[in-house]
Image (tube, helix red, strand yellow):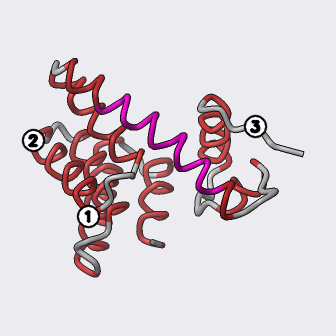
Amino acid sequence: MQLLVQCGNRADVVNGFEEGMQRCRALAEQALGMDPRHPVALRFLSGALSALGRQPEALAAARRALDLCPSYATAYSALAFVHDYLGDFDEARTAADAAGADAVEAMERIRASQPGITLETMIERVPFTQPAHRAHLAAGLERAGWRDRP
């Protein structure tokens, strides 16, 4: 997992977008070398491949992540992004709808298993080191309907 954190941070600091995405691809592949059934690594690989213009490979990586973890909302988002890029708008909408439904279900599972958890606690636990990444996640959770309960 630490390799994938490096991937997210690397894209922010490497000179040149393509170089950063090549590094992310390499880190995701390194993580998959250690655990070929790691859906998060596959999702990172899908994003890097898509950014590098390798859409068929990006689709395959996102689909493989979903085969391993059918409730992985972020992998549905990756799949939707690639379909949208390719002009497959119906497929993109289907994947995006699945991502939204899975995200809501995931939030409810988190709440059920961790009563009293707050948005602040959720954000503190993620492996992102960049404040912008944490803010983006918090905004996304709020848009998805996360509200702290008393």
Where is residue 113? Give x, y as percent: 66, 64
- The stretch of residues the image draws in magenta is 95-110
Q: Residues within 10 Å of mark 1 (few under 14, many from 20)?
A: some
Sequence-first tag of 3 and 1: 1
Q: Which of the numbered marks, if any, corresponds to residue 56?
A: 2
Q: Quadrant of residue 142?
A: top right
Position of the C terminus, as image quadrant, is: top right
Q: Residues within 10 Å of mark 2 (few under 14, many from 20)?
A: some
Camera-nearest residue between 21 and 147 = 147
Residue 19, above or below 31 = above
Camera-nearest residue between 91 and 87 = 91
SS at circle 2: helix
Camera-nearest residue between 120 and 129 = 120
Asked whether, in this view, residue 149 is left or right of residue 27, the answer is right
Measuring 20% from the left and 26% from the top, which residue is drawn there?
Answer: 91
Where is residue 133? Give x, y as percent: 59, 45
Would you name the residue on which mark 1 appears?
26
Of circles 2 and 1, the one toward us is 2
Of circles 3 and 1, the one toward us is 3
Would you name the residue on which mark 3 appears?
147
Where is residue 147? Give x, y as percent: 76, 37
Q: Amino acid at mark 2?
A: Pro
